[in-house]
């Protein structure tokens, strides 16, 4: 049995229109959300010793603001990766750690949840995660595999989901008038 954590980068900063998408950092709301999610991840009680992350600036800043610690491997294949690309990265995880935290982007993370969770394990939590996996969302999947090479569609169940708005209503969706 393996545990896979998925953390979407926090809310990015769009103030500088001249920056490439890859180079955008976090806005104030993003830094607050990342810090809050980092506290939640620490309290959740899983030691995420192996972290695989997109090299995008907003992912780097999310990890910094969250305070999540562990051995971080940056993989350029994770920048805006599809679920299949993320699956390829995870299947190649070296050292076969029991837990892996992947920090990246949507829609790949949300699609990965939909792909990995077995049909018989789809429940209300799954429905929430696949309906919307917002910035700074954190999910944990329990994967019925012996090694990461065996990660495949239908091998998991979603056991945890937390979004910034779950922890602080002020970090919920911005309402437009």
Image (spheres, rainbow, N blue to C red):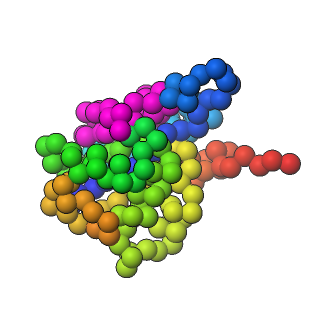
Q: Residue at x 72, y 46 (%)?
A: 174
Which is more toward the observer, 78 or 15?
78
Q: Split into 4 quadrants, where in the image is the N terminus? A: bottom left
129 w.r.t. 34: above or below? below
Spot the residue most to the right: 177
Q: Residue at x 25, y 40 (%)?
A: 50
Instruction: Say left or right for 18 vs 66.
Output: right
Q: Quadrant of residue 56?
A: top left
Q: What span is colored magenta in the figure?
A: 49-77
Instruction: Say left or right for 35 vs 118.
Output: right
Q: Quadrant of residue 26?
A: top right
Name the spot of residue 39 as percent of width and height, x first: 45, 41
Is residue 53 within the magenta segment? yes
Which is more toward the observer, 65 or 118?
118
Name the spot of residue 78 as percent of width and height, x first: 38, 40
Name the spot of residue 32 as percent of width and height, x first: 57, 34
């Amino acid at each position: 049995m393996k545990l896979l954590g998925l953390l979407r980068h926090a809310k990015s900063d769009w103030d500088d229109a001249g920056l490439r998408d890859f180079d955008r950092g976090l806005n104030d709301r993003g830094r607050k959300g990342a810090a809050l999610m980092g506290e939640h991840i620490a309290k959740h009680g899983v030691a995420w010793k192996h972290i695989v992350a997109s090299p995008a600036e907003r992912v780097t800043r999310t990890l910094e603001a969250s305070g999540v610690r562990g051995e971080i491997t940056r993989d350029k294949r994770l920048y805006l990766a599809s679920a299949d690309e993320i699956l390829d990265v995870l299947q190649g995880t070296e050292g076969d750690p029991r837990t892996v935290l992947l920090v990246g982007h949507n829609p790949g993370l949300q699609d990965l949840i939909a792909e990995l969770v077995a049909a018989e394990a789809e429940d209300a939590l799954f429905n929430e995660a696949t309906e919307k996996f917002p910035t700074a969302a954190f999910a944990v999947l329990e994967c019925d595999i012996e090694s990461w090479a065996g990660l495949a569609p239908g091998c998991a169940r979603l056991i945890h989901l937390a979004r910034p708005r779950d922890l602080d209503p002020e970090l919920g969706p911005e309402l437009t008038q």
